[in-house]
Image (cartoon, helix red, strand yellow):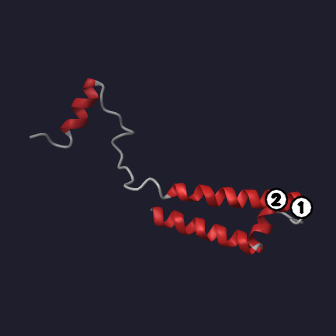
Amino acid sequence: MRTAQAVPEREARDGLWDPCNSLPHRSDPGSPRMLNPLLLYWFGRALMMAHRREMPDDPILYTFRDGASRTTVAAMICIMLAAI
């Protein structure tokens, strides 16, 4: 019967063991991918508002003041917390 310690030693000796592959993997890698459409919407909206000159001050301050940006950031935070 092989133990958990014997397998990495044997594979390391044979040149097959990869320390990156020995780390635990997420069971659902698709959750963080749900951030992509939100980021695309958020950046696109910021660029559109800046082009229309409707963003008078710093983009970070505008994000805190804009309702759609706050909602988008809150949704991204919820997705990140759910992915943990």
Image check: 25 left or right of 57?
left
**In the depicted structure, whether residue 9 falls above or below residue 46:** above
**In the depicted structure, whether residue 31 falls above or below residue 71:** above
**In the depicted structure, whether residue 59 falls above or below residue 19:** below
Q: Residue at x 67, y 56 (%)?
A: 40
Image check: 44 left or right of 52?
left
Residue placed under numbered mark 2 in the picture: 48
Inspect the image, locate mark 1, and give the three-letter code of the amino acid beneath it. Arg
Mark identifier at residue 68:
none
Rendered-image quadrant of the C terminus: bottom left
Mark identifier at residue 52:
1
Q: Position of residue 1 (x, y in %)?
A: 8, 40
Image check: 24 left or right of 69?
left
Q: Secondary structure at mark 2?
A: helix
Q: Position of residue 26 (x, y in %)?
A: 39, 53
- Determine which quarter of the picture holds residue 46: bottom right
Image check: 49 left or right of 43?
right
| Front residue (pair 20, 28) | 28
Q: Position of residue 44 (x, y in %)?
A: 74, 57
- Determine which quarter of the picture holds residue 56: bottom right
Mark 2 neighbour class, 10 Å CA radius: few under 14, some 14 to 19, many 20 or more:
few
Mark 1 neighbour class, 10 Å CA radius: few under 14, some 14 to 19, many 20 or more:
few
Q: Secondary structure at mark 1?
A: loop
Q: Residue at x 54, y 69 (%)?
A: 78
Q: How far apart, in angstroms, are the residues tagged by discs 1 and 2?
A: 6 Å
Q: Position of residue 13 (x, y in %)?
A: 25, 26
Q: Residue at x 65, y 58 (%)?
A: 39
Inspect the image, locate mark 2, and give the three-letter code of the amino acid beneath it. Met
- Determine which quarter of the picture holds residue 18: top left
Q: Residue at x 23, y 33 (%)?
A: 9
